[in-house]
Structure formats: structure tokens, C-alpha cells
Amino acid sequence: MINKAIEISEGVYYVGVKDWNRRLFDSLIPLPQGTTYNAYIVKGGEKTALVDTVNPGFEKEFEEKINSITRVEEIDYIIMNHAEPDHAGAIPYILKKNKKAKLITTEKGSKMASIFYNVPNKRIKVVKDGESVTLGNKTLRFIEAPFLHWPETMFTYLFEDKILFPCDFFGSHTAFGFYDIEEIIPFAKRYFGEIMMPFRNMGRKALNKIEELEIKIIAPSHGPIYRNPEKIISFYKKWTNGETEEKVIVLYVSMWGSTEKMIKTLVDVLLAEKIDVCLYNLVTSDIGDIAKDLVDSRALVLGTPTVFGGMHPLAMYGAYLIKALKPPIKYFAILSSYGWGGGAIKQVLDILGSSKIELIDKVEINGPPTQKDYEKIIQVGKKLVEKIRG
Ligand code: FEO
């Protein structure tokens, strides 16, 4: 196997790896196209920096790529933009081979480097927001961008080449492609929904901070590199602002078909009014797709039967995801059916009641829906349309 670095700008090299076969991240997020752990070497006239590292298990491939342009032992700085192991996990391997490099990170990052990777303090250089380090004819500027998505996160900006290294921010989980690929936005959106959406206020602040920078290349730590970064920046502005569409995300689970009939009736009302609907049966859905559509849906419909005196566990999972991911959804409705005793709706409200999402209406029925029930559901649909359009 020939593992070689790829030059992305003069003296700037991609030394990351593709994880084609990984299918799950955080034991939670599906990766239909795998992912990448991007890392970069910046060679200045006097010094050399490594920007981020790779997931444990890829150290050899990573080392060979670095060695194709410099020697691991000769790296002067290791920039740790983020301490999560998919980017920082190979730091101990590099530091063991290289006795002189300093690890550059934020104050919070220095604590994490010590806790997660046993990096001694004498090998860490803490940088403050806006501080720079020169490599000779290349200058790295560090920009604190906390909670994207851990507290220690920062961006690195290579001034002369106008390259932003934002680590997870602007990232996407796909091993396909290398530079801006046509079909990247759905993957970037999915990634935003899964990872960045709960921190979108911090994302907005970070975007404001980099607004003045001239950026020719965005080199994130997952997915393709952007040589035309305007498009992804404009999407990130929309997503971090919580701008929603006339769109409803419907999450449901049905045991004997009653809840499904209720859901379909309501969906028909929405579609007839030309409201965009994303329908997910929680039994078979990929939660990454759900996260993607949570990014810009204006309303939510949750359908669940009562089982064991409460929500179906899959519906509970869906509701909990919504609470955790904090999407910009404004309105929601609940449809529920039960055999001999309700309880699901109360539990939905226990989970989502404290969120900022306004409950528009709820319908709970006993057994299969009757004509009267369908009429009620049609009214719920009309109320939702009014709110969405309002
Ligand atoms: Fe890709 Fe937060 O690590």
C-alpha cells in the first residue's frame, strides 16, 4: 500500500485517512458512506505543524503519509483543534515518536490533553483567542470557537494561504470525494443536525468571528475539503440561525395500524396544502436522516400508541432525540391510540413539555379511528397549516 500525502496548497498537505467501512459513530449515528479523519501538515520555511490527527487504529497509515513529505520526528507543532479521539486519538503515538513537538491547544484543551492522552504540561503550549504562531513564511492564527461541539474547540487559520481548519465545524460524515462534491450538502446538513444543532448559538458566534477572514479553502476534519466555501458558509448561516421551511417532520410508530391511519390522515391534509412532509416510521428510520430534516422543519407530528401504560419505546427515543438535539421546530401535534388505557400523550408532554415547541393539539383515540376521529385529525392538520403559514 502506498500512503502518500496530497498537496492541497503550496506547502499544505492532506495526511488524513478514510474509514470506508465504519457504519456507526458514537455508538449512535449511522454512517451510510463511512467517514474520514482529516489531518494536515503545514510546512513553513522554518517550522512544520500538524493540524489534528486521526482516529486510533489508523496510526501507521497516518505516519506513512506524514513521512512522505517530512519526518514525524521533525514536526514542531501539533495543533489540537478538538480533543475528541477521532481527531486527537493518535496524539500519544506521534508524541512517542517525536520528542520535541509542542501540542498547541486552548486552555480547556490542555486539561483534556492531559486527562485523555496523558500529555505532560511541559509539552503543551496553550494559545489564546487570536494568538498566532509563525512557521517562517506561514502563520497560523488560532480562533477560539467553544462548544463546537466540545468546550475546548478552536479553529486554526493559515493566514498566507487563506485556509481555515475548523475541525468538526463544516464537516460531513462521508468517505466519498476529496474536494467539493456536488452531493455534499445533504451529508453536511445531516452532520450539522447530528452534531452541531444543539450548539447553534455557538455556531452563529463562530461564524461572526470568521466573517472578516478571507477564506479560500475550508479544510474540515470530516468529509471533503471545500475549495469553493461560499455555499457551505451560506447554508451554515441559515442552519445556525434556525431558519425553518414550510415543512413538517413526522415521526411515528404503530403496532396494529391505528396510529398509522391517524398519521396518514394528517399527512394528507398537509400535502394537500402543499406543506413539505418528511415521514419517518421509527421502526425502520435512520436517525441521521431524521437529524437532517430536524434542521429546518417548522413543525413536528409525533405518533405513538400506548404500550405498557406509556409511549412506545421507539417513540420515546424519537422524542428524547428531539429534546437533546434542540431543533428550531416551533409547533407540534401528537396523535395516539390505545387498546384499553391511555398514557402515551402524558409521557410525550413529560419529555417535550419543557421545550420551547408549542403544542398545537393532540388526539388520543381508543381502538381504530372512527369517522369522527378522522374529522378531528383533519382539524388538527388545518390548525398546523395555519400556524406554519402564520
Ligand atoms: Fe469529529 Fe467531535 O469529533
Image (tube, rainbow, N blue to C red):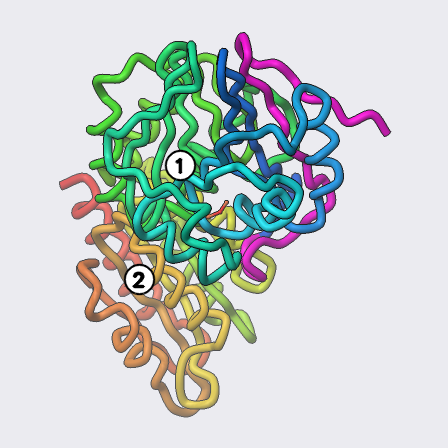
Q: Which residue does the image show at 45% across and 58% down from the upper left?
A: 114
Q: Is residue 338 above or below residue 181?
A: below
Q: Residue placed farthest to the left in the image?
A: 390
Residue 277 in sight from this viewpoint: no
Q: Is residue 316 magenta?
A: no
Q: Is residue 95 visible?
A: yes
Residue type, label 2:
Ile
**Above or below 385: residue 240:** above
Depth check: give the residue in front, 42 or 270: 42
Q: Is residue 33 above or below residue 354?
A: above
Q: Of label 1 and label 2, which has the lower sequence position?
A: 1
Q: CA distance from mark 1 to mark 2?
A: 41 Å
Q: Is residue 5 left or right of residue 224?
A: right
The number of numbered discs placed on residues in the rendered structure image is 2
Residue in view at x 30 percent, y 73 percent: 351
Mark 1: which secondary structure? loop
Dot 1 amino acid type:
Phe
Nearest the camera: 134 or 183?
134
Q: Is residue 16 magenta?
A: yes
Q: Are marks 1 and 2 in contact (CB under 8 Å)?
A: no
Q: Residue at x 86, y 29 (%)?
A: 1
Q: Which mark is residue 377?
A: 2
Bounds of the magenta segment: 1-29
Name the residue tied to disc 1: 169
